[in-house]
Amino acid sequence: MPRQTSHVIVAKEASGPQKPSKPRDPVASGERDAAHNRVASHNYFLLDRFEAGVALRGTEVKSIREGQANLKDSYGLIKDGEAFLLNVHIGPYSHGNIANHDATRTRKLLLHREEVRKLLSKTQIKGHTLIPTRLYFRNGRVKCELAVAKGKQDWDKRETEKRREGDREARAAVNASKHKMGR
């Protein structure tokens, strides 16, 4: 009579030795922004924010991962039912060849038709424009955060700076009093 064998499945222990994970690039994994427009909140009141995909070439994505993107003088435009991103500077890829991308070419934004209609209606108001505030990765894809913005006057900027300075002084006074009491 043939001998019966029983198959025993041994589960790996969760606390056992694990393979060390390769550290991912914080920009590529979405932990850190690839580019941030710091001047935008200084020069504009940022009203509504939208997330849009960006149609890029391969060397552009690699350059963004290297931190070669700059949003300083960029803006958004809606034309013929499509959204575009102008003046975004994405530097050349370090390991690129003659077929490298143009640094400031116009790039198409990937939005749903309804989102484009909303943006168009909001930017037709006098003094409102589209400003990209940051570039980041989500699930391996480059995304752009767009803000509908209204330009600040000089007195608005001074008022914002005064408020910020007052908050900073108040925080410093609270910290100083905490430090005194701790002695």
Image (cartoon, helix red, strand yellow):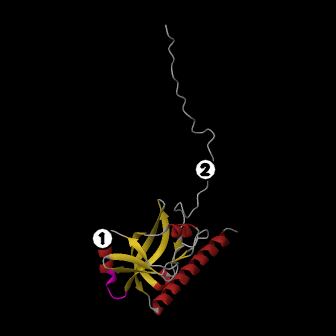
Indicate left or right for 111 with 134 as reference.
left
| Main secondary structure of the magenta stretch | loop
Q: Position of residue 3 (x, y in %)?
A: 51, 12
Few, some or many residues within 10 Å of mark 2 (<14, 14–19, 20+): few
Q: Is residue 116 magenta?
A: no
Q: Is residue 125 magenta?
A: yes
Q: Quadrant of the C terminus?
A: bottom right
Amino acid type, label 2 = Ser
Residue at the right extreme, as displayed: 183
Amino acid type, label 1 = Arg
Q: Which residue is mark 1?
A: 113
Magenta-drawn segment: 122-127
Report whether residue 101 is seen. yes
Q: Which residue is nearer to you in this view: 67 or 51?
A: 67
Answer above or below: position of 1 versus 87.
above
Residue at image x 61%, y 53%? 22
Q: CA distance from mark 2 to mark 1?
A: 41 Å
Q: Which residue is mark 2?
A: 21
Q: Position of residue 76 (x, y in %)?
A: 41, 79
Q: Position of residue 28 (x, y in %)?
A: 54, 62
Secondary structure at badge 2 equals loop
Few, some or many residues within 10 Å of mark 1 (<14, 14–19, 20+): few
Answer above or below: position of 134 versus 6.
below
Report whether residue 33 is seen. no
Q: Which residue is nearer to you in this view: 149 or 141?
A: 141
Q: Position of residue 13 (x, y in %)?
A: 57, 35
Q: Earlier in the sequence, mark 2 or mark 1?
A: 2
Residue at image x 37%, y 88%? 127
Residue at image x 58%, y 81%? 169
Secondary structure at badge 1 equals helix
